Image (spheres, grey):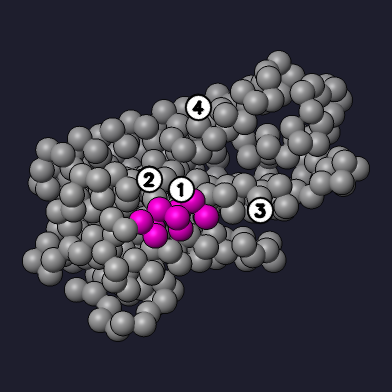
Amino acid sequence: MSIKATAVTFQDFFRHARKEVREEILKNIHDEDMLYALEGGKMLRPAMLLLAFHACNGSEQRYRYALESAMGIELAHSASLIHDDIMDGDDERRGKPALHVVRGIGAAILIGHRMISRAFRISLAHGIENAQIFLDTWDETLMGQLKDIDFNAHLEDIINGENPNKLIKEYFKIIEMKTASLFATACRAGAIEAKAPPELIHLMREYGREVGLAYQLADDLVDIVMGKIEEGIIMPIIRAYGEKLDPEIVKKLKENGTEIVEEALRRNGLDLKEIYKEEIKKHVERAIELASSPLIPDTVYKELLKEAPRYIVNAMISNINMVI
């Protein structure tokens, strides 16, 4: 069921959890296309579900339900990536050709829907509360993706026509709906499978949300440093240029966004990585604060909850030689 050692790192737990979820997938999923889409995933959300389950003193008898639920989370997440790749025109995913490249767009869309259907069946088998949470989260994720599409499609109009504070709020709303909601649901589901009391279930949801926000901010920072101009660029743009942008600047941002923004930030005594580091740290520290709550039993898993946010973020930003 779980790692028995009394002194264990989150990295050890993460490795163990990924192995168990992969074994659960191979035992239950036999469709080659689904397995292709699932192959190579980090299994971060399922691992957080299992960690929340253990932290809430889930019993040995309940663990199989937690493991099934973790598989469902990974099915839904991987399905969303199939559809993301089609919408974004990305031809590679997890170090290999994206599913739509291998099977065609039409087939990939349908395979994604089948994976979502399978995930929903798992949640329904675990009770109406689980099923309702699944549907609510999936709807929120879809709405976040729709907002993301609209945000990027009208980036120039938004930059030139909106209040900066409103823009920042919109950015955070997108990452909360698109990413943080699934982290929140994973941790919440782990607590539910452990039969935790309502106040602890709510705490786990808030903890997962903070971890998800920190993770997406780190992901956006890596994308920006690598030259991708998406909604994450809004935060440093506003810090660099203020409320309004000259149309010529907008044009240059689209052509060579990262270098343009970094140069503007330098002129204002600011640094791109530091802007994000400051924001990421807020959510990491808030997650650690929640993980320190007396509502959570004092076990090794409570300590792992505290360790997880910083580990997850640092694993992401190590690609750009940064650490929180």
Magenta-tinted stretch: 285-293
Which numbered disc, 1 or 4, marks the residue that appears first in the sequence?
4
Mark 2 surroundings: few (<14), some (14-19) or many (≥20) residues within 10 A: many
Give me the C-alpha separation between circle 3 and circle 1.
Answer: 15 Å
The residue labelled by disc 3 is: 277
Above/below status of 194 relative to 124: below
Q: Quadrant of the C terminus?
A: bottom right
For the view shown, which residue lies furthest in the top direction? 161
Which numbered disc, 4 or 3, marks the residue that appears first in the sequence?
4
Secondary structure mainly formed by the magenta segment: helix
Q: Locate residue 206 relative to residue 274 in the image: left or right.
A: left
Of discs 2 and 4, which sits in the foreground? Answer: 2
The residue labelled by disc 2 is: 206
Above/below status of 149 relative to 4: above
Looking at the image, do the residues carrying marks 1 and 2 touch, with CB atoms under 8 Å apart?
yes
Of discs 4 and 3, which sits in the foreground? Answer: 3
Which sits in the foreground, 175 or 227?
175
Q: Residue at x 87, y 46 (%)?
A: 269
The residue labelled by disc 4 is: 147
Which numbered disc, 2 or 4, marks the residue that appears first in the sequence?
4
Mark 4 surroundings: few (<14), some (14-19) or many (≥20) residues within 10 A: some
Which numbered disc, 3 or 1, marks the residue that appears first in the sequence?
1
Q: Is residue 149 visible?
A: no
